[in-house]
Image (spheres, helix red, strand yellow):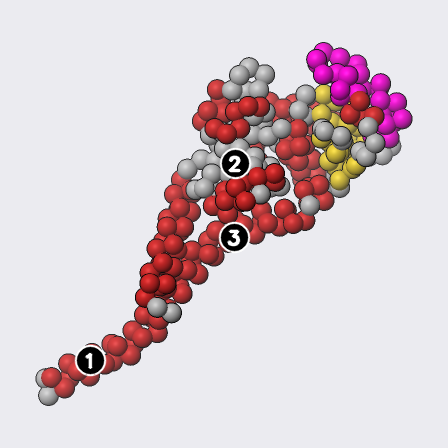
Amino acid sequence: MNKITRTILFITGGLLLGLNIVGIFLPLRHPDIYQLKPGDGLLLTESQFYDRAQRKQEETPLAYATRLNSIVHNGIASYGNAIDRINGQIPIYKNYLLFFAGYIYPQLYRPYEFCNYQKAIERGLGICSQQSIILTEILRKNNIPAHIVGLSGHVVATAQIDPTQNTWWILEPYYDKIIPYDLTEIEHKPELVRPYYASLPNVNTLVETYAAPGNRIYPTTKSYAGWKKYYIEKLSYLFIWIIPIACLIVACLPRLILWPAQKASNAKTYANANH
């Protein structure tokens, strides 16, 4: 390996490593997220979100699911048209691999939707699908079975609100609605959801969304996002460190290998000169 290649690797490794270190101290949550227009604004900080999302010991699955649904609604901002300025694309200092993926494959990575619900809460940003991921993940961690429901152009959640009767209801964090029917009941009679969306201007569209063919229940976030995206995100947070460290090791390896021999040679030369 020639000197120019080693120099390029050393500079690349140093820059990427420095970028990662800077990212440790910079927030993922953009400060402008608190200035979104009313109706799309963030009402809870990250710490407030976690404090309120803790399940109380006496809470039933229904009570907790209802309360958590509102917490997600109030704690995760819908970005609307502000996506380009509030870290919809992962900042380069947080994950340069996902950042560049936003340019290579913008349909999937720009704006970016986290599979890791904790990262999503940290950023505080997301539309219906991101909010449903957060909701279902937290419910499952609190021993309440929950799934993501993919509709035609919309995403909601479903949770087992009564384990004794195996009763499942639809949870709608994006609009902060609890719909007391399971998906099968709604598909047979979509008008069941109309009263719950009646105050919204797009109520007819939402009713039609539930009626559209192809609705699907995803047991996990991995099954919803797809295993490729799921593992790409997971591994990217490991490789953003492996890549720069590998570059530095490869760049410095020849010098490290030759250093003992050079040291011995210098010592021998010094000894001969003083003999």
**Would residue 263 be visible to someone looking at this image?**
yes
Q: Which is nearer the N-term, disc 3 or disc 2? A: 2
Q: Position of residue 245 (x, y in %)?
A: 42, 58
Q: Specify the amino acid type for callout 2.
A: Gln
Magenta-tinted stretch: 183-207
Q: Which is nearer the N-term, disc 3 or disc 1? A: 3
- Is 181 placed left or right of 247 in the picture? right
Q: Position of residue 47 (x, y in %)?
A: 52, 30
Residue identified by numbered label 1: 267
Residue identified by numbered label 3: 238
Task: Give the alpha-carbon distance from disc 3 to disc 1, as whole Å.
Answer: 42 Å
Mark 1 neighbour class, 10 Å CA radius: few under 14, some 14 to 19, many 20 or more? few
Point out the image quarter for the C terminus.
bottom left
Residue identified by numbered label 2: 89
Question: What SS does tag 2 mark?
Answer: loop
Task: Give the alpha-carbon distance from disc 2 to disc 1, as whole Å.
Answer: 55 Å
- Residue at the location (53% across, 16% down)? 37
Q: Specify the amino acid type for callout 1.
A: Ala
Residue 45's place in the image compared with 239, above or below, is above
The verdict on residue 73 being magenta is: no
- Residue at the location (52% across, 41% down)? 103
Nearest to viewer (mark 2 / mark 1): 2
- Is 164 placed left or right of 152 in the picture? right
The verdict on residue 197 being magenta is: yes
- Is 184 placed left or right of 7 in the picture? right
- Is 250 placed left or right of 270 in the picture? right
Nearest to viewer (mark 3 / mark 2): 2
